[in-house]
């Protein structure tokens, strides 16, 4: 019984973006309709390289606009990237996952945190379920 409660609790705490990403192209989030590119020309060289890895790997499963237009804490980005790495066929190695996380954390701090009202917060499970229901 305790194990079942733990599983339910952990599942309930999973990031809403993870759930949306799992649904693939079956659901369109508000973030998906935003810009799908970032001008990283002023970012440090290692972050510019990180952006390329991020764009290549993350666009395999969902729109690249989704993470570009979403704000999360550094801890949330870390959990999210780890979950995405473990998706079947993600093809994201540990080194690439670290690069992607470092890029997302840098971008969050240096672009999004300066103007958070321009970006969407991650959606709740209930909000994602409502969007799925509307789109089917």
Image (cartoon, rainbow, N blue to C red):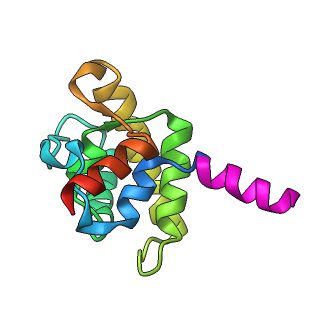
Residue 58, compared with residue 93, is above or below; it is above
Q: Position of residue 107 (x, y in %)?
A: 33, 36
Q: In this view of the protein, can residue 5 be seen by the observer? A: yes
Residue placed at 30% from the left, 18% from the top?
114
Residue 76, compared with residue 92, is above or below; it is above
The secondary structure that dominates the magenta segment is helix
Image side of residue 128 versus residue 12, left or right:
left
Magenta-colored stretch includes residue 22:
no
Q: How many marks?
A: 0
Q: Position of residue 13 (x, y in %)?
A: 60, 46
Assign the C terminus to one quadrant of the image. bottom left
Where residue 39 sits, quadrant-wise, is: top left
Q: Identify which residue, 43 or 118, lies in the foreground.
A: 118
Residue placed at 77% from the left, 54% from the top?
6
Residue 103, compared with residue 133, is above or below; it is above
Q: Residue furthest right?
A: 2
Assign the N terminus to one quadrant of the image. bottom right
Q: In this view of the protein, can residue 46 be seen by the observer? A: no
Residue placed at 38% from the left, 40% from the top?
123
Q: Identify which residue, 5 or 66, lies in the foreground.
A: 5
Q: Position of residue 3 (x, y in %)?
A: 83, 61
Q: Identify which residue, 60 or 127, lies in the foreground.
A: 127
Q: Residue furthest bottom?
A: 89
Q: Position of residue 54 (x, y in %)?
A: 32, 57
Residue stretch rendered in magenta on the structure = 1-12
Residue placed at 42% from the left, 77% from the top?
91
Q: Identify which residue, 125 or 78, lies in the foreground.
A: 125
């Amino acid at each position: 019984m305790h194990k079942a409660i733990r599983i339910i609790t952990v599942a309930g705490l999973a990031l809403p973006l993870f759930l949306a990403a799992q649904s693939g192209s079956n659901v369109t989030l508000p973030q998906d309709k935003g810009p799908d590119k970032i001008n990283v020309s002023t970012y440090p060289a290692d972050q510019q390289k990180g952006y390329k890895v991020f764009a290549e790997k993350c666009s395999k499963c969902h729109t690249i606009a989704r993470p570009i237009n979403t704000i999360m804490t550094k801890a949330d980005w870390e959990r999210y990237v780890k979950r995405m790495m473990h998706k079947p066929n993600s093809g994201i190695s540990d080194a690439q996952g670290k690069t992607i996380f470092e890029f997302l954390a840098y971008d969050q701090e240096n672009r999004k945190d300066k103007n958070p009202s321009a970006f969407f917060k991650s959606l709740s499970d209930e909000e994602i379920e409502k969007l799925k229901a509307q789109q089917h």
